[in-house]
Amino acid sequence: MVRMTENTASPVTKARQHGQDTLRRALLDTASRLLAEEGPQALTMRRVATAAGCSTTVLYTTFGGKEGLADALYREGFERLGSRLEEAAATVDGPDDPIATATALALAYRAHALADRNYYGVMFQRAIPGFTPSSESLRVGNATLGILADAVRDAIAAGILIPADAEAVADVLWAAAHGVVSLEIAGHFPDPEVAADRYRTLTRAALAAFLAGPDSDEFRSP
């Protein structure tokens, strides 16, 4: 009889030692990896269970079925993004510094996309054909993206950004960030330094369009 060690234990065996939340994340990480490496056809309960080293019963108990698994992947991605954005916003010294806040949020968005690109594909790139998020998962996603809108709203109220629809401004800033990082993930900017420069340039340019007062000229300067 072979005794399982820390190195040979399956992801599920290791995760069970740390509680249900860790187990759930381990299963989702396995599913997201299979999805990225083998495509949507690999997202079956049997295939995920085999890769995770558990029974399909564990997956059905945790997620209810394939649709529940897909929904959990979507929600987990946004929860991770939300944590990164909140942590980034907390590092800004002054709450009335929209440049610092927007920069921190933009960097956190790119960091999430690159670190959790398997989840990013489910969130924004329709990695699972035909999947529709549940209303609760959509609420989580909207609340996460609302962090940027809240930052824009505060800056408008402070007179640092021009009077505008905060959600519309946030959409533009998000589109700029999403577009560049999606190209990077697709391999169009293989040099990390070039990718970071393109990302910084476009996100700064998008924000500059909404800055009010003399600070706008200084921000637009190279």
Image (spheres, rainbow, N blue to C red):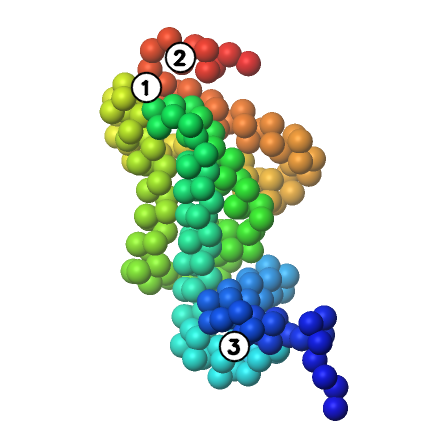
Residue 160 pos. (x, y %): 32, 19
Q: Quadrant of residue 216?
A: top left
Of mark 1 and mark 2, the one earlier in the sequence is 1
> Dot 3, how many residues are within 10 Å of its Cα: few (below 14), some (14-19), or many (20+)?
some
The residue closer to the viewer here, 149 or 125, is 149
- Which amino acid is tagged 1? Ile
> Mark 1 highlights which residue?
160
Q: CA distance from mark 3 to mark 2?
A: 54 Å
Q: Are the residues at dot 3 and dot 1 in contact (C-beta closer than 8 Å)? A: no
Q: CA distance from mark 1 to mark 2?
A: 8 Å
Q: Are the residues at dot 1 and dot 2 in contact (C-beta closer than 8 Å)? A: yes
Q: Are the residues at dot 3 and dot 2 in contact (C-beta closer than 8 Å)? A: no
Residue 71 pos. (x, y %): 41, 64
Helix, strand or loop at label 1? It is loop
Q: Quadrant of residue 100?
A: top left
The residue closer to the viewer here, 92 or 209, is 92
Q: Residue at the location (38% across, 32% down)?
A: 172
Asked if residue 52 lies left or right of residue 164, the reply is right
> Mark 3 highlights which residue?
45
| Disc 3 versus disc 1: nearer the observer | 1
Q: Residue at the location (49% across, 41% down)?
A: 109
> Mark 2 highlights which residue?
215
Q: From where the camera sits, is residue 207 visible?
A: no
Helix, strand or loop at label 3? It is helix
Q: Residue at the location (60% across, 40% down)?
A: 184
Image quarter in which the N terminus is found: bottom right
Image quarter in which the C terminus is found: top right
